[in-house]
Every structure is written in C-alpha cells, then in structure tokens.
Amino acid sequence: MGMRAVHTPQGALWDDKTQPDHAMRAASRAAMAQPSVGGAALLPSEALALLADGPPMYVAGLDGKLTYANSAFQRLLESHARKSGVDTKRASRLALDEIVCDVTVSGAEVNREDVFETDNGTVFYSSQHFPIRDVDGNIVAVGGTYRNATREAQAWLETLAARERFQDISRLVSDWIWETDADFTFTFVSPRVMEVLKLHPRHFTGTSLLTIGKPHPLADSPAAPAPTPDTRSPFRDVMYQVLDGNGEPRLCLLSGLPVFDEKTGAFKGYRGTARDVTVEVEAQRQAARSQRRLSSAIENISEGFALRDSRGVIVVFNSKFQEFFSPISGTLRQNMPYLDLLQAAKAADILAPHSRGTFDIWMQAFGDNEPLAPFELQFADDRWIRVSESRTMKGVVTIINDITETKRREEALLRAKLMAEEANRFKGEFLANMSHELRTPLNAIIGFSEIMRAETFGKLGSDRYVEYSKDILDSSRHLLGIINDILDLSKADAGKLQLYEEEVDLRQEVQDAVRLFSEHALDVGLKLKIELPETPPPLWADRRKIKQILLNLLSNALKFTPPGGDVRVSSDVDPFNGDLRLMVSDSGIGIAPKDIEKVFSAFGQVESSLSRRFEGTGLGLPLSVALVELHGGKLELESTVGVGTKITVRLPARRLHHADGGNDAAA
C-alpha cells in the first residue's frame, strides 16, 4: 500500500458519547459539501459506507486518539476489552501510541502481526498501518487495516509444532535421519549422527548418498540392492560400511523413500533413515559362532542327544542318537513328533521282550510331555541303553548312554559274586567239617596226654616220656586254639556268630584274663597292670566273647613288648557320648602306619624277632574286630614305632546298665 493523501475533516473525537463511525460519516458529509480542499479529492459517502462494512479499519490522530473506527474494528476492540478486563476507551489506546510513533518516525507503512483475545478465542491479525498526509505532504493522521490471519497463523503454529516434533523424534530415535536432493546430495542430516558416527551433520554437506560408504552385504543373508543414480524407488535395509569420526568402520542399515513434487511429479530426492547395527551384527556373528560350537559339541559328545520342544516335536538330534535307532533311522528327521519315532520303534520290534513294558510306560508318559526318571532298555541285538530326560525352559532334553559294556561287567561281577558266595559257603562247610574232624582226635590226644603227664596209671619209666607228653599236650592245645579261631572267624565272615548276652562284671572278666598271663609276664620280665574304676557300670554283652577279646589283645601286647616293658588294661566311659572304652596298651615295638592294614587282615603278621615268642596265626586281631562289631562297637588302634601300641574297644552306651536305670540294653 503506497502513501495516501486523504483530507480528514476535524470532526468529533470518538468517546463515550459519540460513535466513531457516525463522527466519520458526519465529517465526510461536511467535507463533501465543498468541491475540494487543496486539490485533494474528498472521500464520497459511498466509499465511507464500504469502509464501515469492511474489515477492521481505523484513523487516529497524531496524539493516538481514534478519529474513526469502522464497525468491525469497534467490535474487535469491544471483544478484546471484555476478555482483557479493561474499558473500551482504554483498550482503543493499547497499541495506537506505539503504532503512531513507528509510522511517524519511519514516514512509511508499518506491517505488524497482532494477537487479540476475543469472545471467539485467540485471533491472529496481519495489520498494515500507513501515514495520512495533507496536500503539503505533512503527516496529519495514521490509518490502519486489519486482515484476519488466524488460519495462516494456526497453519504456521502447526508447522512449528510439527517441526518441533520432528526435531524431538530425530534426537530421541536411535536412527539418524537424512534427506537428499534430486542429485542424491545430502541436504539434511539429523544431529543424532554425532552420537552414532561421531561426525557433525555439516560433515555430510555437499556429499552424496551414493558415496557415504561401500555396500557391505552379510555373508549369511541376502543383500538388499543399493541405490544407484537411476534409482527412483524405495529401498530398505541396505548395509553400508561407514567410517566414523575415529576412522573406525561402522555398519549401518540405510532405508529411503523417493520424494516427488506434488504438482509436477518431478523427482525431488530421497528422505530416509540410517541405523547403526555394528553391535547387533557382531552379536549375531557371536551367536552364530556359539551356535556352530554348540552344534559341534552336541554332534561330538559320546551320548545320544535329542531336544524336543513344548509340543513334543524333535528340534535337534545328533548322529549318535540316530545310531541308537539305526533300524528305523530312515524315519528320523527334524521337526517330526517324538511320539512318531517311539511308535516306529515299537512297530519295528527293536526291543528285547523284557524292555517292552518300560518302553510302553515311556510312550504313555508322552501325553503330558513330561520327562521320566532315568530308565534302562535292552534292544533285541543285546545292546543296552540308559535314557535320561530333563526339562529345559522350552522343552525336554533326552540323553541316551550306551551301557552295554557296563551291563556286561555287571553281569560278570554278579557271576563272580555268586561264585565267591558259593565258594565261601563251601569254605565254611569245609572248615566246619574239618574242625569237627580235627577236634575229635585232638580232644583225645589232649586227654591222653594229660593222663600220661599226670602218670595216673603209673610211672611212664624215663623222665623224658613225661617231657614228651607235656610237649604233646601243649602242641595239641595250641592246634586246637588255632582251629577254634579259624572256625570262629569263618562264622563271623558268614554272619553266623551269635551273641548270648547277659550282665557282665567287667572288673571280674579283666582280672580273670590278666590272671592267665600273670605267670608268663613275670617270667619274661613284664609288668601287667589293671586300671579300672572301683565300681564299673554293669555291661550287657556276651561274657565268653568279651573274655576272648581281652585274651587276644593281651596275648598280642605281651608278644610284642620286650622285657622290662609294661602292659596295662584300663576302662572308662566316654564323657561325650557315654560309650564304654576298654583299653589295652603296651610299651612294645609299635606298628608302622603302612603295616596297620596288614595286622587287621586275616593271617596277617608283621615280621619281628619278638613275634616268635608265641606262635600265632595272625587271627587274633581280625577276630577281635569281628567280635566287637558283633556287639555294635568298634575297635581303634593307635601305635608309634618304638613307643608302643594302644587298642581301644569302644562299646555303645546302650550296653551299659546305669544305676538310674536310664538305659535298657537288653531291649
């Protein structure tokens, strides 16, 4: 709008009493009564009427007061005044002072964007304000018009909002966004590229999409076609190798859509995204390597391996698993129902008769796809397998072991065990028979020797016959003792020894046993001591076997203790568990740790010059162990070479009769 020269009559100002449009009309009619003023044409009444009904317009004096305002401007001010909470007169001067100042200073048209809060909400106006000059060119007033620009403003705000959303999305998404022109030259790259590639968006200015990097298709996936200068169609997930800001190669997937002019249809370029998949691709490669290693491990294990999913379908199996079902291996395939394999095995009759029942149970349990406890099957060709199943997160793993050799060894061991038991039974019977056959004549020899030694029926003649009869008696008794020990040990091994239990006075039994060895101990220069409580608790046990244990232990102690040493028998009650402890200790030659196992074995003896003072078979200690264990106790041995040996017979507390009657061993 150019500079306008409009004669403005001096009419009444717009105030609370005079409406501006009326004042303007009156002033215009008065002005039109004269043909001209200074050569400027006056506004006709028709023009004023059109202005009154047009868009918001006003005329203001240089003091900022309205001299004319049409109906539209008046309604705008009134609505704005109501929403702003000020009176109409004040509202009319809200911005006119500033506008008049801007126009008079610039001497030219001033354009503004105005926002009004009205009854219809927020309204945007684009306004033009111009100087009004007299015929001499002096500015005498300021006029203005307002055009409703709400639609344009809303569209502009929506554009700003869309741009803000786009910027937010481009910052938040992991992909970086790009645009090119028709020559594939980048025109926009989102800031996200700085985090992904450590390159500023300006780095791509002037570069071409076609030279961003080199296509890098993966070996195990089909390659998407890369864009070319002639490309005008969408492309998706094209793999490129791009160097980042540090010169390190990164793998990016580029996708793009062509953009065309809506009016002409001309190609304008591409718009798309790029995603850094370096870590993802490396993870896939690692997973593939792990998968290959896992597959190789499954294939190379010695057991048959099969995995079925939650539907009971075979997911994977190895060749060893296939071998176990060799008669029907042609039917075995991946993704087949596991139950179909079992049904095929049953139909082929590949199992031994006694394994068919177990196999049927396996098939019946398949309804719930639940793993069974480990079980064994035998095939018709005599092969044995052990089947173990375990549940995984999404299925069931079946492990099959070939236990044919194990079964054969078990059968061999079982046969050997049965043979050993049979031999042991024969041995027991043989020993029993031999003992009977030997003891009968030995008893006769012992009896006749005693008569001859006592010269019951008269003198034998020479004294040497008496000595011979004594030797015969001693040898016979020794031989009878050996036979009795062998028989007792064989009974113990066969579990045929029995206890004839009664209340035993431990002090009396110890004294009786020691008395038998007292004379011999005195002869060889040994001290034999008893250290027992004054009133030891009564013991519920087999009297004869307790005495036999004492005699065996005392005999060994005396045998292996050199002259000048001592042997002692002691007893107490263990304060921790109440067990009775009967101890025989000596200051003899002791036993080396490596020989302890030997002395506990039947007929086992440790070679020693002292061991020959008494003849023996090495059965005393093993037999004592058997007799102690028969009472529910145990025998403990402590020994140090050159210091001595201590043997403890430990009998359980339940065999003691305490004064308070708290234990009843007989029960």
Image: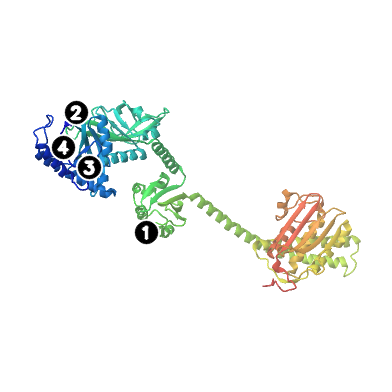
Label 2–label 4 contact, CB within 8 A: no
Q: Name the residue under label 4.
A: 9
**Amino acid of disc 1:** Gly
Which type of secondary structure does the marked residue at label 1 adopt? helix
Question: Which is closer to the viewer, label 1 or label 3?
Answer: 3
Nearest to the eye among marks 1 and 4: give it.
Answer: 4
Q: Name the residue under label 1.
A: 367
Q: In the picture, which quadrant includes the N terminus?
A: top left
Position of 179 with respect to 390 (left or right) is left
**Marks 1 and 4, how far apart in space?**
107 Å
Residue 592 lies left or right of residue 403; in this view the side is right
In space, the residues marked 2 and 4 are separated at their CA atoms by 16 Å
Which one is earlier in the sequence, the residue at label 1 or at label 2? Answer: 2
* Residue 395 shows up from this direction: yes
**Looking at the image, is 111 positioned above or below residue 556?**
above
Give residue 167's quadrant in the image: top left
Measured in 3D between alpha carbons, the distance from the residue under mark 3 to the one under mark 2, in whole angstroms, is 36 Å
User: In x, y percent, where is residue 425?
Assistant: 62, 61
Q: Report the residue marked by disc 3.
A: 150
Q: How far apart are marks 1 and 3 (CA)?
A: 72 Å
Front-lying residue, 458 or 370: 370
Neighbor class of circle 3 (other Cα within 10 Å; few <14, some 14-19, many 20+) is some
Please tell me which of labels 4 and 3 falls first in the chain.
4
Instruction: Give amino acid for label 2.
Output: Gly
Assign a secondary structure to mark 2: loop
Q: How far apart are marks 4 and 3 (CA)?
A: 34 Å
User: Do callouts 1 and 2 mark residues in contact (Cβ within 8 Å)?
Assistant: no
Q: Quick one: label 2 or label 4, which is nearer the N terminus?
A: 4
Q: Position of residue 315 (x, y in %)?
A: 37, 48
Q: Which residue is drawn at 53% across and 51% down?
A: 409
Instruction: Locate residue 247 relative to residue 461 in the image: left or right.
Output: left
Please say if the residues under marks 4 and 3 sit with CB atoms less than 8 Å apart: no
